[in-house]
Amino acid sequence: MGPAGSFHSARRLVKCRTKFRTSPWGTSVTHAAITGWGKCLPPNVLTNADLATFLDTNDEWITSRTGISERRISHVSLEEMAYVSSMRALAAAGLDPADVELIVIGTCSFDDQVPNQASGLQVRLGAKRAAAYDVNTACTSFLYARSAANAVIRPGGVKNAVVVAGELISAFMDWHNRGVCVLFGDGCAAVVLEATDKVEGLLGEKLGCDSDARGTLIVKGMGGRYCNTGRPYGETSWIFEGPEIFKRAVLGMSGACADVLAAQGYKVDDVDVVIPHQANLRIMDAVAKRVGAPADRMFVNVHKYGNMSAATVAVALVEAIEEGRVKPNSLLLLPGFGAGLTFCAHLVRWGERTTPLGTTDVDLPPSDRTALEIVQGYLTKAG
């Protein structure tokens, strides 16, 4: 296939001209196009050299194993990052927050579990009409949250939704464990979905869970089983079986990609950009090889942000748009993998517009500490 935008074949033009699909109940079903997008990355950068000041590690050790050079550490709450990214996405869509009908947040690092994270964002946005709920499937939470919102829009339950994916994972990190803490970072992004009669947005999805191996990734200290045990909340230890996670991540994401492409009648050569979960460069390379996707069609930003869990695919999607990788009518493939062990892949048809309708001045407050100073604070509290 040639450059993005040159993929039009007679078969695909027929697909693009189809206005409606029919539900099992015989009623017309709309689609949920992405009309707005925005990201929020904390300004504080934690480099590999910073990590080497308190861990037995170095830049070569980290980059050779993960492809990660730096990551962001947030000085604000998850709600604050979600608010900024949502306002940017709403401005890009030209949608007033008061007109939002649904808010879905994908995360595993809640500011509060009760009340839910999405209700706090509803208050910040002034979206009084909106239903609001959270989705937690760890690193796949953005894609699962998008599936959930899509399922409400298509039969006409709501006309629009804000889907947010973000993590403040640094607050729950075991900063003494070099095998884990070098991998993760904080960040957030959001998209606006709106009902349309055009064949845009989510064309197909494959969701799954390799639960017999869920014990390979456990964050001890997060959850009710640790209450009243003498362990301070937020003091964690991580079970992270890297080789097994690597193997299952590659199989899960590549298998989901093959399934969703086959179900929709496409081949990998039809895909313009693959935007995978940014966990580890070697995992992404292995997925690309198994799927048969050329390296120049893979979007990679893991070197800048590390693994932001739920936020990785969302932030990568926004940056792919900003960098001109997503063209009008592009076909996108978005695979993910996370604790549980959840896996998924979305096949997305982009619309005509790749530029925001508007912008906003909303931004994070300035930070009075460096990323390393924030992490040193976590280390001091953890003893």
Image (cartoon, rainbow, N blue to C red):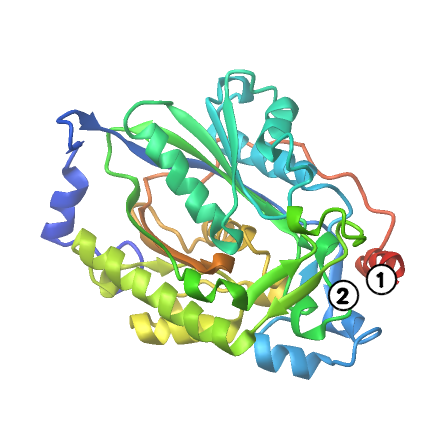
Residue 206, percent from left and from top: 31, 53
As helix, strand or loop, the secondary structure at mark 2 comes to loop
In this rendering, would 380 be left or right of 259?
A: right
Give the quadrant of residue 71.
Answer: bottom right
| Residue 356 is at least partly visible in this image | yes
Which residue in the structure is indicated by mark 1? 379
Which residue in the structure is indicated by mark 2? 175
As helix, strand or loop, the secondary structure at mark 1 comes to helix
Residue 95, percent from left and from top: 48, 24
Residue 107, percent from left and from top: 57, 45
Task: Tell me which residue sits at (58%, 80%) in the image.
Answer: 65
Amino acid identity at mark 2: Trp
Task: Tell me which residue sits at (32%, 74%) in the image.
Answer: 290
The quadrant the C terminus occupies is bottom right
- Please tell me whether residue 304 is drawn above or below residue 315 in the rendered image: below
Task: Tell me which residue sits at (52%, 21%) in the image.
Answer: 96
**Residue toward you, 282 or 328:** 282
- Please tell me whether residue 122 is drawn above or below residue 173 in the rendered image: above
Amino acid identity at mark 1: Leu
The tag earlier along the polypeptide, 2 or 1, is 2
**Residue toward you, 85 or 143:** 143
